[in-house]
Amino acid sequence: MYQWTRREDERLLTGKGRYVADIEVPDRLDAVFVRSKVGHGALRAVDCRAAREVLGVVGAWSAADLMDMPPCAHSAATLQDLPPVPHTVLAKLSSDEAVVGREWPALVKERVRYAGEAVAVVLGEDRYRAEDGAAEVTFQVDPLPAMVTPSAAAADSTLLFEGLSNIALRGEAGKPIEDKVWQDAAAVVEARYRQNLLMPTPMECRTILAVPEGDRLTVWSGHQMPHRLRRELAALLGWSQEQVRVVVPDTGGAFGSKSASFPEFVMVAFLAVKLRRPVRWIEDRLESMLVATRGRGQDQHARLAADADGRLLAYELHIDADVGAYPHLGVGLPMQTAWMATGAYCTPQVHATVRSILTNTMLTYPYRGAGRPEAVIALERSMDTMARRLGIDPAELRRRNFIPPESFPYTTPTGRTYDSGEYARALDLALETVEYDMWRAEQARRRTDPTAKPLGIGLSCYVERSGGEPGGLHEFGSIEVGTDGTITARCGAASSGQSHETVFPPLVAKTLGVDEQRVRLIEGDTDEQPQGLGSFASRTAQVTGAMLQHASQLVIEEAKQRAANLWDLPLEQVEWSDGTVHAAQDGSAAMDISELVKATGPLRVEDRFETGMEFPFGTHVAVAEVDPELGTVQLLKVVTVDDCGVVLNPDIVHAQAFGSALQGIGQALYEAIPYGDNGVPILANGLLDYLLPTYTELPPIEAKDTCTPSPSSPLGAKGAGESGCIGLPAAVVNAVVDALQPADCDLLQMPLTPDVVWRAARAPKLEEAR
Amino acid sequence: MKITLTVNGEEFPLDVEPRRILADVLREDCGLTGTHLGCEHGVCGACTVLVDGEAVRACLMLAVQCDGGSVRTVEGLTGSDGEPSALQRAFSTEHALQCGFCTPGFLMVAAGALEADSTLADHPERVDHIVGSNICRCTGYEPIRRAIMRAAQEQQQATT
Amino acid sequence: MKPAAFDYVVPRTVPEAVDALGNGGRKAQVLAGGQSLLLEMHLERIRPDLVVDINRIPELDDMQITDNALRVGALIRHHVFESEQAVPGPLGSLFSLAVVNIAHPPIRSRGTMVGSFGWGHPASEWCAIAMALDADIRLQGPEGARTVAARDYFHGPLKTARRPGELITSVRYPLLAERTGVGFIEHRRTHFCFAQVAVAAVLIVHDGVISEARIGLVNCADRPLRAHAAEQALTGVGIGPPTDGYRLPEDHPFTRAGRIAAEQDAAPLAEPYADLEYRRHAIAVVAARTLCQAANDHRSRVGRTKGDSQ
């Protein structure tokens, strides 16, 4: 038998992986949604009659039609109207107050608020036939002014919800800074930053298959939070949670975008129950590009003050966040940016304010980095501008202001308590790895050579947060020992490519002192593991890992207790080593755990374990060469140094760092969603129009790490996997700024497309402006 | 329309609508779900299979176009003895996959090139073109490049 | 999205294909490589009633050189031209420079050169080269065969002189003389998107002086273009010595020709990330650089032939 590197590899490399679209269920129907081609308007006259006549179409409904649907004999017979999309206040990502009066319907009833919002659903024997039906549905939308930027919507000249402001939430972190601080500072830099709207774009779009069986519903979904999905679907059906089983099979990437319930999920569950027939929705890319949740989307205004020696005095960040058409998912997410505004520096005063503004874009929601990249980009771009203003090397400016290692735990002015950090060590390693002095010399040489393309070096020192927010820093799980010697670990996490099956069994095995081949992991199934939180916020190694280690220790305690009872010995005379119990005095009584289970009955321990909030950090460096005539940017070298504490599996963490780095480059240089005045994204050619980085765009990336263990978790492990999206965009933009030295840095807004860079290259230079 | 496809050496007599794309027929009519659909725009390449030895997008071909032809999918990469191919082993060794969704497409575009070109290991730029054919959102591509190069080198050593 | 239903026929001869296309005035589409057609059907921008699959017509799978011209049949795939030797002389070099910009290997192994003319996309590399070289397009219809010069063929965005019942059987390009310098440069945002601008340049040079220039512009208007004004500005001009660095001097003839191409020949349309000002500028830069590349190519050809004769 060939030994695969990861346990997931055999099935995924031989075509035996099982994603939701691969699951064959008899009589299953495909759902297709009829979508608005207008971004904002009043819906009229949805007519599904012709669709129902199409061969292979089983049904077609508008929101109004569903009211007239006959009740069925099923236990959901009481379900009259289509319930709205559940909202979540988890981790303060939304608030009840923001949501009241702003219901997100599963199908539009009166008002279309984003392009692609579903106005009808068609069920067919397969996707082809369902689409045939969808093509026959007719409807009208009387357009209203579409607002696709926070500034357009903030004025409230057109309201998305009658009688309610488009500003759905206001918040702040830290205290307001007095004018005197700015007036007295030796240097103040001020800038505006646009955080471009992004598409998370996992290669597998969203999926759900709902299979009714008796009075239960089994839901298969590529998802990050199966227990949340179970809870929300049960609530909308008016069922108990035990009646819903959510199973997460292989999932083709998520990057934050697969942790909620969506309008289409509500429809699929509702129709499966109403019709007593399996129904699925396999989102296609065209739909995903219109209606999958977006990431980022902030307009920021930042102000940074320092004294003449480059010591930071104050930092102020205002955020106008584009949270999309409904406040259900990410309305509070910009608070993450506010809380993380302080960054890696001991700036005495920091104040961040947020306005979450509803617009006619699809909803904004966590995407890999989720609030932290926005904080890092604003601060780290401002740091480079300050370094230029003061004539201090940008590395040196950062070094002078780092929170020193002896100051941890460190409570920031924006209310975070950082667990541990050695920020200068990561910076030093990054500068050494990239050969900083060599590039500075090359930069100087090129500045005197008119035939050479300008070159810039950009730094970004980031601090992120992993684990989740208070109230969501725990995970549930269990460990079961079989009489055949196998050990089964269960947890509430769900992998979408993070190799949980490879990483966690060795951790359990190491704690128990057994061969890792004896241990297997089961996750992503709410019938197997009754409670759980899931995989988000870089939490799984940190929280689930700690939970599984904790559960393993409980197994040892339980085994020792059983052996003490069996052998009639005091507990302190029973010892555990290498998967066996034995009497401290007499080695001959050693018994393997499986033998003990045979003798004493089934052994399964279950528990919940909580860690603290943790703060990974690092330094990223990018070296960019710019063609000022065409505006193209070529990255000559990228170095990432990440510190996520104790690493459970270096290869897996390295692979995550590398992959996330390319996603970070995507935000900096390529990815964005252009909108027309009508509120419709300009993406006519499908995935040809949303530019994901390809191999051709991949620069030489060197990913390294330092290790500063976290005191907040027994493993010492902090979260990993989002670093490249968080740290790298600022480094890339700073490198381009450094190459071109424009007097007005606001010209360089992401993505740094050729036209943007060309304009900045033609603009007055810093020295000309002085 | 009645057609016959030979998929991974097995004959499939099929009755398909002309509009059905090859990927759907492989997945649904032949039950070979290893071929994934990532965009249906010919862009991502997750659905790449070999048709008469050549790597093609199975979302940009109709199944009826392949009538009488031979198709290879990821399910056909493993040897008849059940042992993984050098390419599959190299992908595992190099961590050339994370979520695995795009993986079958990369494997097949690489398999086509390895079979057509025994000197691939000597031409890194050709490997670059292969890796540059598809989209992966997880790995950052470099591990995929290393895996294909490793398999090419192993193939070359085996034949010399 | 999935393609809507259609009828499908597989003719074995060109007359059969033409018969099928003309049958009953239905919305028919020719399927050759299908790499654009299938995408358009997925996007539901094209919903044919009938698809005529010409892949089993052997006579179309043919490439020939006659009378100092290359005739490319309708089933010749893009990837054939990846080898510089596939076509003799500088034309082969020009094709091999251009073809690598067309998507990537799995698309190039299906898609056809002639299919690009059926489609007539303004960003088509082949169509712009055809404009530059005065290629002609051979069409077979119910009324018989006809030949349309490239300059008369492209009528607008995705609009061509091809009539609904007609099949493009081949495209014919004149071969290029031995010392002709060729260049092709494409500017785009990533490897996977259409060109923002691309330029094909052909320079016939005698004793360092340009006797004829041909310039094709990709995605510089609503259709493939030839830059006549820029070409005229180059006739009789010396190519000068090779230049250092990426930036040509402002007064260099290629810089001037690039500006003329951008300002007089091109009629660019605004796109996201490329407004008219940027597009015109980029056309000028890419055209100048491509002319440089063609001049360098000429120099190396001269060097090689001198080497051969020694």
Image (spheres, rainbow, N blue to C red):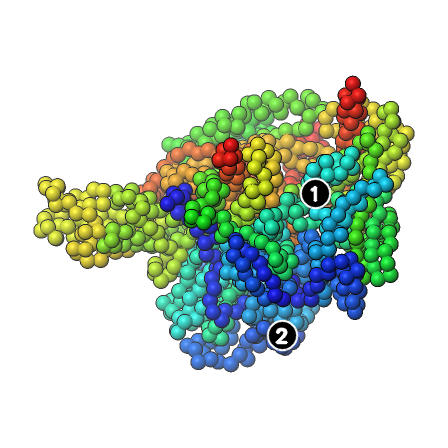
Amino acid carrying mark 1 in the image: Val
Spot occupied by residue A444 in the image (x, y as percentages of width and height): 63, 22
Quarter occupied by the N terminus of chain C: bottom right
The answer to whether any part of residue A317 appears in the image is no
Query: Is C79 situated above or below A429?
Result: below
- How far apart marks 1 and 2 lie (CA) works out to 44 Å
For mark 2, name the chain: A
Whether residue A293 sits left or right of residue A683 in the image: it is left
Residue at (52% x, 61% y) in the render: B30
Judge by depth and name the residue closer to the eye, A709 or A506. Answer: A506
Spot occupied by residue C273 in the image (x, y as percentages of width and height): 70, 45
The answer to whether any part of residue C73 appears in the image is yes
The quarter of the displayed image where residue A42 is located: bottom right
The residue under label 1 is C80
Quarter occupied by the C terminus of chain C: top right
Residue at (31% x, 46% y) in the render: A517
Query: Circle 1: is it few (<14), some (14-19), or many (20+) Cα within 10 Å?
Result: some
Residue at (44% x, 51% y) in the render: A11
Query: Circle 2: is it few (<14), some (14-19), or many (20+) Cα within 10 Å?
Result: some
Whether residue C175 sits left or right of residue A130 in the image: it is right
Spot occupied by residue A416 in the image (x, y as percentages of width and height): 43, 44
Judge by depth and name the residue closer to the eye, B132 or A496. Answer: B132
Residue at (21% x, 49% y) in the render: A593
Residue A54's mark? 2
Amino acid carrying mark 2 in the image: Val
Judge by depth and name the residue closer to the eye, C183 or A664. Answer: C183
Judge by depth and name the residue closer to the eye, C15 or C191. Answer: C15
Provide the secondary structure element on which disc 2 rests: loop
For mark 1, name the chain: C
Of tags 1 and 2, the one toward the viewer is 1
